[in-house]
Image: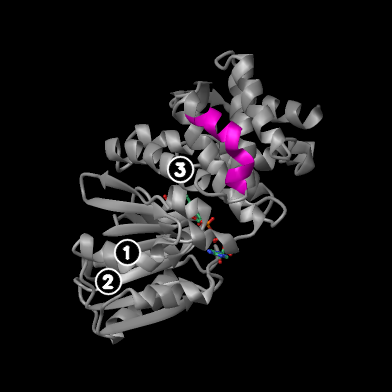
């Protein structure tokens, strides 16, 4: 089966991402090829990742000392307290900056372990082995690491690039359908911000991708990573262009939060709803042609995902949704930044709208 390789070249580091089916079993070769010599390492493994993956990884590490630690990954354990407990293991076992910490898990594991790596003695070697579709197409690229606190999500963190990322798509077989949809939301976003050609590929092969069929899955992950690579290489620290990756997230995060992060609307589903809201908002503000709007909406409908906000919210929830939209870093009490879609690959990043305009939009959506 084909093995894809992408080089991410940021100002702070250049590193490879490998994507392929069953490539974890080749990781010894991949490490050697990239001159990665692991003398001592700590593997932090998500407890829901099937155990055989850890065994395969361990067999591929030529090292005198391998420690491992099982992580109960959830938004609550994505915390400074947990980072501290990882640091403690590293200190007790006399790790130094040339030793490795390896994340074997989804976006939460990668974010937490990457952050611990970035602050341990001001930076130790970090390897990311993402095990969810979302982490393979999104969170493992670009070096954002961090944790949540009582003030909100991902508010404490750093930009810290790994030495290497290995995305083995075989590991995704144990994911449930909703987690796959979660990753698909980010793939859809990447296709909208890039070229219509990428969106058309998704449209044609969406069911094969959602059913994790090779070679469609690997190609889609590779294309999606390439889109994010081109953005983070030009704007590693999110000065402007990288904000494009937040398409759909201002609405999406607010939907997720006002629904109490409940299981009936997960992150990816909220992002997909958010993308649809951004598209509708762009349509009614006369920046998105009806034809493109319809194309995006029918894609999501064919996936059997609900695009109807009324399924999750009532009209009386509008103020709560707005409260979360206003609390976003870029917004304030009067104005909210909404990323608008003008066409595939044509995104308007910096438009701000009066809160009352967004309020009427949400009320209308919940009325119809
Ligand atoms: N750093 C970034 O740039 C960036 C970008 C997007 C999202 N994120 C962060 O990523 C997180 C979401 O990531 P996620 O969706 O991967 O969530 P996650 O890490 O919580 O994983 C989702 C669920 O799948 C389980 N799991 C992981 N791998 C599995 C496997 N192979 N088989 C079976 N179960 C498995 C996990 O235990 C968890 O229950 C959020 O905290 C978000 O803030 C970060």
Residue 114 visible in the current orientation: no
Q: Element under label 3?
A: helix
Q: Nearer the viewer, residue 5 or 163?
A: 5
Over which residues does the magenta segment extend? Answer: 198-210
Number of residues whose C-alpha sits closer than 10 Å to that of mark 2, classed few (under 14), some (14–19) or many (20 or more): many
* Residue drawn at the location 66% of the way across and 22% of the way down: 294
What residue is pinned by disc 2? Answer: 100
Number of residues whose C-alpha sits closer than 10 Å to that of mark 3, classed few (under 14), some (14–19) or many (20 or more): some
Q: Element under label 2?
A: strand
Report, in whole angstroms, how far the alpha carbon at label 2 lies from the one at label 1: 7 Å
What residue is pinned by disc 3? Answer: 219
Q: Quadrant of the C terminus?
A: top right
The answer to whether 257 appears left or right of 107 in the picture is right
* Residue drawn at the location 43% of the way across and 53% of the way down: 1
Report, in whole angstroms, how far the alpha carbon at label 1 lies from the one at label 3: 22 Å
Cβ–Cβ under 8 Å for marks 2 and 1: yes
What residue is pinned by disc 1? Answer: 127
Q: Element under label 1?
A: strand
- Of mark 2 and mark 1, the one earlier in the sequence is 2
The answer to whether 290 appears left or right of 221 in the picture is right
Number of residues whose C-alpha sits closer than 10 Å to that of mark 1, classed few (under 14), some (14–19) or many (20 or more): many
Q: Is the magenta stretch mostly helix, strand or loop?
A: helix
């Amino acid at each position: 089966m084909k093995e894809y390789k992408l080089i991410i070249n940021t100002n702070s580091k250049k590193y490879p991402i490998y994507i392929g089916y069953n490539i974890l079993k080749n990781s010894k070769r991949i490490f050697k090829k990239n001159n990665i010599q692991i003398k001592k390492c700590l593997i932090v493994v998500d407890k829901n990742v099937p155990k055989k993956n850890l065994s395969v990884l361990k067999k591929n590490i030529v090292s005198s000392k391998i420690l491992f630690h099982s992580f109960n990954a959830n938004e609550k354990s994505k915390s400074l307290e947990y980072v501290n407990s990882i640091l403690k293991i590293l200190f007790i076992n006399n790790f130094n900056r040339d030793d490795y910490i390896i994340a074997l898990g989804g976006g939460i594991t990668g974010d937490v372990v990457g952050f611990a790596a970035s602050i341990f003695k001001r930076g130790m070697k970090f390897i990311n082995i993402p095990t969810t579709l979302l982490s393979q197409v999104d969170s493992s690229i670009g070096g954002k690491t961090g944790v949540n606190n009582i003030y909100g999500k991902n508010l404490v963190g750093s930009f810290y690039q790994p030495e290497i990322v290995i995305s083995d798509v075989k590991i995704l077989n144990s994911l449930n359908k909703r987690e796959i949809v979660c990753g698909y939301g980010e793939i859809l976003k990447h296709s909208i911000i890039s070229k219509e050609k990428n969106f058309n590929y998704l449209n044609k092969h969406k069911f094969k991708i959602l059913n994790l069929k090779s070679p469609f899955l690997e190609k889609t992950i590779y294309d999606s990573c390439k889109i994010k690579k081109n953005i983070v290489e030009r704007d590693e620290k999110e000065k402007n262009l990288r904000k494009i990756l937040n398409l759909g997230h201002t609405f999406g995060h607010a939907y997720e939060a006002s629904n109490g992060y409940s299981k009936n609307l997960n992150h990816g589903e909220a992002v997909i709803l958010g993308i649809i809201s951004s598209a509708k908002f762009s349509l009614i503000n006369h920046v998105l042609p009806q034809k493109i709007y319809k194309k995006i909406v029918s894609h999501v409908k064919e996936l059997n995902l609900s695009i109807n906000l009324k399924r999750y919210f009532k009209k009386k929830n509008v103020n709560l949704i707005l409260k979360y939209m206003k609390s976003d870093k870029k917004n304030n009490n009067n104005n909210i930044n909404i990323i608008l879609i003008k066409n595939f690959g044509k995104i308007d990043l910096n438009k701000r709208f009066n809160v009352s305009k967004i309020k009427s939009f949400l009320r209308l959506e919940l009325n119809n």
